[in-house]
Image (spheres, grey):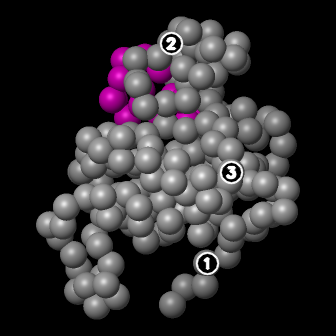
Amino acid sequence: MTNYRRNFVAGGSFFFTVNLADRQSSLLTDHITLLREAFRQVRSRHPFRVEAIVVLPEHLHAIWTLPPDDLDYAMRWRLIKTVFSRGLPNGEPISPSRRNKGERGIWQRRYWEHTLRDELDFVRHADYIHFNPVKHGHAQSVGAWPYSSFHRFVELGSYAADWGGDVENSMCFGER
């Protein structure tokens, strides 16, 4: 079995990509209220700040900051996935290995995590998050996608309301 290495930093800020098992699914946006409730429940017991987030039909990206004395983002993701999954009816395809472990077939087992190094790293990842619906063809403009912290960033003055209209080719998001 692969030994995954995670960078655990108490009070750190992290960028995450979390995917559904079925990349053709739209469960996350179809059940956005349930996903929001899963976040609320977990945050009430295990606080963390959601600095930026975008929810697409089959995956989400988020930046979290943990409390100063806490480094356990893995537990939080496990709980969010569990609360969301338990709120959905059974019926999704389940592989034999998942069935043997008593798992549902909703989420990919793993997720991608990146420890943010500095303010520039934060800004680049926030830009990536907010532009993602346009990149994937879910919206014509960043502001048109409803499941994004972009709207909060506009209210705070971090972005202009029309941000992202001409930046696709000029922004470096770390992808090749």
Residue at 43% across, 71% down? 109
Q: What percent of the width, then of the height, locates residue 84?
A: 37, 57
Verify whether residue 131 appears in magenta.
Answer: yes
Looking at the rendered image, the disc whose residue lies closer to the viewer, 2 or 3, is 3
The amino acid type of the residue labelled 2 equals Gly
The amino acid type of the residue labelled 3 equals Phe
Which residue, given by chain and number where applicable, does mark 1 sit on? 4
Q: Give the CA separation, mark 1 to mark 3.
A: 23 Å
Chain-order first, disc 1 or disc 2: 1
Which residue, given by chain and number where applicable, does mark 3 sit on? 48
Placement of the C terminus among the 4 image quadrants: top right
Looking at the rendered structure, the secondary structure element under dot 1 is loop
Q: Nearer the viewer, residue 166 or 92?
A: 92
The amino acid type of the residue labelled 1 equals Tyr
Q: Could one spot residue 176 in this view of the protein?
A: no
Which residue, given by chain and number where applicable, does mark 2 sit on? 165
Highlighted range, magenta: 128-142
Verify whether residue 130 appears in magenta.
Answer: yes
Q: Give the CA separation, mark 2 to mark 3.
A: 31 Å
| In contact (CB < 8 Å): disc 2 and disc 3 | no
Dot 1 alpha-carbon crowd within 10 angstroms: few under 14, some 14 to 19, many 20 or more: few
Looking at the rendered structure, the secondary structure element under dot 3 is loop
